[in-house]
Image (tube, grey):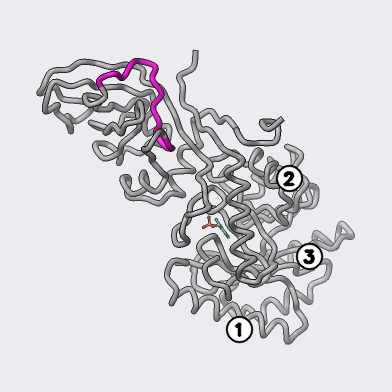
Amino acid sequence: MSRFLQAEIDLSALSQNLSRIKSILKSAGSSCKIIAVVKADAYGHGAVQIARSLETHNVDFLGVAFFEEAVILREAGIKSRIIVFFDREVKELFKYGITPVIFDFKQAKKLSNEACKRGVTLPVHIKVETGMGRLGIYNDPCGTIKKIASLPCLEIEGIMSHLSQAEEPQWSRQQIKRFMELKACLNKSGINSFFHISNSAGLVYPEALFDAVRPGLMLYGYSSNIPETGLKPCMTVKTKLMDIRKLPKGTPISYGKTFITKRDSLIGVIPVGYADGYFRKLSNRAYVIVRGKKAPVVGTVCMDLTMLDLTDIADAKINDEVIILGYSGKERITAKDIAEWAETIPYEVLTSFGSRANRRYTGGKEDRL
Ligand SMILES: *Cc1c(COP(=O)(O)O)cnc(C)c1O
């Protein structure tokens, strides 16, 4: 029998979050396209199922980090356009009908040669540096893109950049301004590709919407800077109590004796640890929910096990459900709470949890039948 660690993914929350994104665009008077970001296994939610669900809502593009992620989607029967953000793959992408992002001239040349050899025109997006300091053309982007435009067998479908601190208006406006200047320069030369710079947090800037947006986090129900009303977290993570022990006052709990019971205690054990993405940093900091009440994590989080103080939940029983991330009664624990306890960001919490949990999907079409 396998231990119980389940990530429940609510697909109706996904469609609600997508609607919220569409309504933000609409109220900004924008009809821009949506590139739904499903990299890192859809932030731990399962890329194939999330992509299938998004496909039923007609998003314009899916975005992934690496070519191999795009192949997994194609092999699962996903037909939508897929943009690969960070990869130098040249040959195989033709086979799968995948759209690459170019971040230097050399890569453009190779793709052009390969497309010509195959007698096709390849749509590509080009990434430019505006302040992220990661990938993208930084040296004379307008001139370089014009040079790329003169290569045969490529169609420059999109021009993109990325905000490095979208929560910070002043810096973001500077990035947006650089991007606008580039657009003006390219438009003058007759290059009228569609422009995109906004991730989820960029949606607060109407001037940053351009012709497409690339939301990731918001699809999964979180935002770093937009009121979360109307957003619903897609992921709930649950396990079960595998043991409850009555221990006297003064008993050390877990490695390093970082917690010593201050009273006669009920200590619960759950089969979840840092190998499941439950960060060690959560030791003596996090809470979970048992029988509708919050229970603190006590002692050091182990590789496969974590201990809880259940003394105030006297009716707790072995096999009771334990909510690590999610709602129960009036209590809730969000990826933001866990991120705060672990001194990280909700992105890392979501992508970490996806790894070892069994996923179960609810709220999909098959559910409603
Ligand atoms: C991850 C990523 C996004 C999505 O960012 P969110 O903050 O999750 O909305 C958009 N564009 C690129 C290039 C990315 O790598």
Q: Amino acid at mark 3?
A: Ser
Q: Which residue bears the numbered disc 1?
A: 181
Q: Nearer the viewer, residue 218 or 280?
A: 218
Between marks 3 and 1 in the image, the one whose residue lies nearer the viewer: 1
Q: Secondary structure at mark 1?
A: helix
Q: Tell me which numbered mark, 3 or 2, is placed earlier along the sequence.
A: 2
Label disc, if present, on residue 56 of the rendered structure:
2
Q: Is residue 323 magenta?
A: yes
Q: How many marks?
A: 3
Q: Using the rendered image of the protein, determine whether residue 172 is visible from the camera's viewpoint.
A: yes
Q: Residue at x 69, y 76 (%)?
A: 145
Q: Amino acid at mark 1?
A: Glu
Q: Position of residue 73 (x, y in %)?
A: 70, 42
Q: Which residues are magenta?
A: 314-327
Q: Secondary structure at mark 2?
A: helix
Q: Tell me which numbered mark, 3 or 1, is placed earlier along the sequence.
A: 3
Q: Position of residue 81 (x, y in %)?
A: 75, 53
Q: Which residue bears the numbered disc 3?
A: 112
Q: CA distance from mark 3 to mark 1?
A: 26 Å
Q: Position of residue 270 (x, y in %)?
A: 35, 24
